[in-house]
Image (cartoon, grey):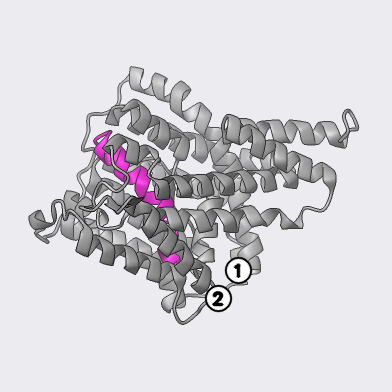
Amino acid sequence: MSTPGYKFDRLELSGSLGDLGTLLPIAVGIILINGLNPLGLFFSIGLFYILSGAYFRVTVPVQPMKVIGAYAIAMALSPQEILASTALMAVILLVIGVTGIINIIGKYTPQPAIRGVQLATGSLLMSEGVSLILGDAKIQQIREAAEPYLVVSTLGPVPIGLIIGLCGSVLALFLMDNKKLPAGLLIIILGLLIGSFLGTHEGLGQLSPNIHLPKFMPFDFPGQVDFTFALFALVLPQLPMTVGNAVFAYTDLSREYFGVQSKRTTHKAACISMALANGLSFLLGGMPLCHGAGGLAAHYRFGARTAMSNIIIGSLFLVLAILLGNNILYVLFLIPMAILGVLLLFAGLQLALTILDIKQKRDMFVCLLILGITLASNLAAGFLAGIAVYYLLEKGKVSV
């Protein structure tokens, strides 16, 4: 259960940093590869963190939409194509939220399917975390280096990322429940120290703090071709994952963690919150944003218990964006990829453990089915298949 109101302490600070492993790799990739605006992107993220925390009054995650982000980076899509997807997601989420359609969908979404989404998402986070530690993640492949912003790549025959990842993981294991020395905070401090001493310091000499404000529509307005492409290639594959993970799995986990304090975290409110955030991100040249069960698990696992964690991380991004403008990336480069991997690994473990309340064989079957399909295909396909198989099992059409 959470403590009512806002609480500022080391745990909230630690928890506020817990989801950087999910956020930064896609954010950095979509800026470097697709050319989105760093100032507008991180300004919209910071504002979304602060406003969502202020409204929901509990810890609220802010994440990139992973299907859109991963595909956009892999295919080097244009800013207009990405922004078209952002605008379409904003409209769709607003419609299903305001009209209450999301509540109807939620009524027929069984609990085992939600647990399956949480298990599958947790497994994906763990896998991505290990990839970042080993140097195999997409952003590392694109940069052709496991640690592109460190001057040292190995210590003897051992990759430096593996050493950093192992040290960070050991630190996390020993300090995960330590309230005096919060694991998330110390892991980030470790990363910044490594980046300060062994980093390339790319662009740090260009830093000149000033007042920077994001531009309104920094890119040309997307055309009809951009919207058509975005709808079929980005939005339709993303939508089931957003509904499954960023609405149902997220609101379920929020109620589990915060109880009555999470009364504002409803399906409708989550949709409208994401719709407004994506409307803002579209106008400022940012990326598609959402909530997510994995992000909440990350914040919670590293100590976040109140909305203060949102205020902390949101203010950090806002201040850095306003003071440094597009040069904000050079500060973020100080955090080694392996450190982000450690955060992802333990966030995934926390989220996957939510299936411990599954008691029936039938329900566990649905969870594992969603996991298997997700690993072989994608979370959207796993979520839809899980719902279908649940009702077949419930009606006695098939048995396990």
Where is residue 28 drawn, in percent x and y? 30, 45
Residue at 75%, 43% (x, y): give it. 110
Residue furthest to the front in view is: 156
Q: From where the camera sits, is residue 81 visible? A: yes
Q: Amino acid at mark 2?
A: Pro
Q: Quadrant of residue 368?
A: top right
- For this view, does 382 lie left or right of residue 311? right
The C terminus lies in quadrant:
top right
Where is residue 232 drawn, in percent x and y? 47, 21
Residue at 21%, 57% (x, y): give it. 199
Q: Which region of the structure is painted magenta?
A: 15-36
Is the residue under label 1 in contact with that under label 2 (CB below 8 Å)?
yes
Q: From where the camera sits, is residue 309 visible? A: no
Circle 1: element type: helix
Residue placed under numbered mark 2 in the picture: 4
The earlier-in-sequence mark between 2 and 1 is 2
Which SS type dominates the magenta stretch?
A: helix
Residue placed under numbered mark 1 in the picture: 261
Q: Quadrant of residue 395?
A: top right
